[in-house]
Image (cartoon, helix red, strand yellow):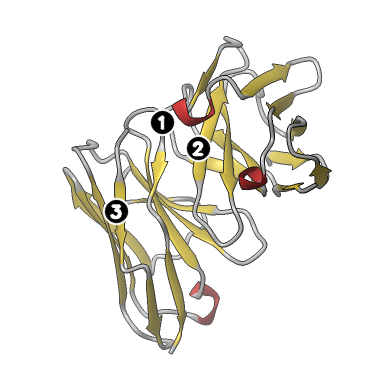
Amino acid sequence: DIQMTQSPSSLSASVGDRVSITCRASQGISNSLAWYQQKPGKAPGLLVYATSRLETGVPSRFSGSGSGTDYTLTITSLQPEDFATYYCQQYYSTPQTFGQGTKVDMK
Amino acid sequence: QVQLVQSGAEVKKPGSSVKVSCKASGGTFSSYAISWVRQAPGQGLEWMGGIIPIFGTANYAQKFQGRVTITTDESTSTAYMELSSLRSEDTAVYYCARAGGFGELFPFDYWGQGTLVTVSS
């Protein structure tokens, strides 16, 4: 199985801050990397797929980058509705695996 | 607009089984893989297995092999996940999720609302 190591596990930030979350795969995943946002009591929602493609309706302050084994989700100018937990997922091979999550809370 | 609506919360005894349903609407059910992902309290996301309804053959994570069965009923656009030999560690929210392409190896673009399964004596 491909292991996904996400960092940090949590971070505190303020509205307007630039935030970056990284995800490292245990082997190359050919950009088959997605990011999800989850709020308490809700299902995850797709933000980014294929490393850098924004899902329809996702604000442009979200962006994804990376290649090979290393990937990054960046939120420029954090908004109040962005405080949530974020997960990366590789869908390069079965079983699809997720990072352990990054909780973004208010400083 | 695609919607996945799951069955309600369940409380089960250790050793028993649970079957959770996921009814799809607003899209072409047969062509898109449906996966099941679980989330234990305060924990991350764990893929359990998936199925492409038009093919009918499920693929399972090794951890759940022999305990999980994923099926579909194309006539009602419903997917099912049955987990047997339940133990307390299976207490979790179980989600169904649709892969956003023809095949299993796509990101999950639609999710059900989740079903809480509590295993307790």
Q: To which chain does the residue with label 2 belong?
A: B
Which mark is first along the chain, 1 or 3? 3
- Quarter of the picture holding the N terminus of chain A: top left
The label on residue B47 is 2
Find disc 3 in the rendering and name its residue: A5
Q: Are marks 2 and 1 in contact (CB under 8 Å)?
A: yes
**Location of residue A75 in the rendering, given as x and y in whole percent from the top left corner:** 36, 71
Give the answer, above or below, for where B113 lies relative to A28.
below
Helix, strand or loop for disc 2: strand
Query: Observer-nearest residue: B73 or A51?
Result: B73
Q: Residues within 10 Å of mark 2 (few under 14, many from 20)?
A: many
| Residue beneath disc 1 | A95
Gap in Å between the C-alphas at discs 2 and 1? 7 Å
Query: Both on one chain, marks 2 and 3?
Result: no
Q: Is residue B3 above or below residue A101?
A: above
- Image position of A18 (left or right of B62): left
| Residue type at numbered disc 2 | Trp
Residue B12 occupies quadrant: top right
Residue A64: x percent and y percent? 30, 57
What chain does mark 3 sit on? A
Label 1 secondary element: loop
Q: Mark 3 belongs to which amino acid?
A: Thr
Disc 3 crowd, CA 10 A, few/some/many (<14, 14-19, 20+): some
Q: Are marks 3 and 1 on the same chain?
A: yes
Mark 1 belongs to which amino acid? Answer: Pro
